[in-house]
Image: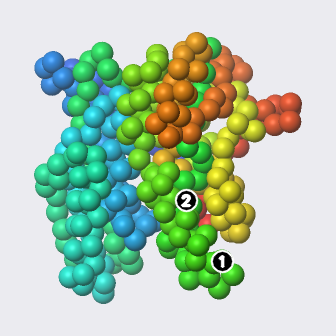
Amino acid sequence: MRYPPGKLPHGELARLLACYTDVHPRLVVPPGLGVDAAVIEMGDRYLVVKTDPITFATDEIGWYAVHVNANDIAAMGGEPRFFLATVLVPADQATPELIESIFRSIHEAARSLGVAVCGGHTEITPGISRPIVVGQMLGEVSPQGLVRPAGLQVGDALLLTKGMAIEATALIAREKGEELRRRGYGEPLLTRCRDFLHTPGISVVRDARLACHAGQVHALHDPTEGGVATGLMELATAAGVGLEIAADALYLAPESEQLCAEFGLDPMGVISSGALLIGCAAGDVDAICATLEREGIRAAQIGTVQPAEFGMQLRRGGVLEPLPSFAVDEITRIF
């Protein structure tokens, strides 16, 4: 048996973590499904640590690597501080121009967040067909500021910032541009879609910071591979709760809807960095949404947290149906 591309199946990952994860007295948050980063006690501060690769993108791959890793630090309530990268470049593409462009995009992304690039490794690698950047982000958080995915509580509201398929929209436009032109897509639309990388953008660092200051936030999670549906499932699994999600509250930009429809992709299951799932006290929904909206970040309540026995349900047209699940990210169907 061979696994398909993308994340390791959740059941197998859970089994491996149960077998091979060590307990350490300073490991405050160990690895687990829905856990965005490890948290290590370092005296009066916690060290928040994350590693994540970029394997779908080639254009501005360094920008993706920095922001995707920073997002996971922010989803624990932390501030990203230091970044390291392992850069692997295919032997038949290893031009000075390509390598410098990767370094430049890492530098620009880190500078946009106030993060210091402090090390890494670069090599020309046989046996791969596209550049790969494996990022490592180090951040910090105070003990009282730590947000755990397991903190989600029955009765909480679930919010979503920006919308679904933001990263997918940028990826498709940047990596499939020639094909889209052949299909009749004009440059103005493709330019808007490519710019989803920056506007609304794939970073959720500001989203998390603003939400945590505006109200009582119990859990955060950024939906990446597998999209919002998988992100919701991971969050519910980490907290041992059920969810009721309103289908008509899940925002999808017109550009994202058009590109997903063009390739027959379900927006709920496509890579969605740039969105942030927020579990908060029901009474703080208005304050958190208003704060985010004032800063130009779309935010809306998409559901409520239910007891575990309720399961994970999607309300569509007044009827409950199981929340869709995706064994692999929808984007793998076109890459």
Side of 272 where 265 appears, left or right: right
* Separation of residues labelled 2 and 1 (CA atoms): 17 Å
211 in relation to 81, above or below: above
Q: Which mark is residue 110?
A: none
**Residue at x 50% of width, y 73% of height:** 175
The structure's colour scheme is: rainbow
The residue sitting at 45% across, 51% down in the picture is 202
72 lies left or right of 287: left
- Which residue, given by chain and number where applicable, does mark 2 sit on? 168
On the question of residue 15 being in view, the answer is: no
The image shows residue 17 at horizontal and vertical percentages of: 39, 37
- Secondary structure under tag 1 reads loop
Mark 2 vs mark 1: which is more N-terminal?
A: 2
Question: Which quadrant holds residue 147?
Answer: top left
- Quick check: 20 above or below 165? above
Res. 297 visible in picture: yes
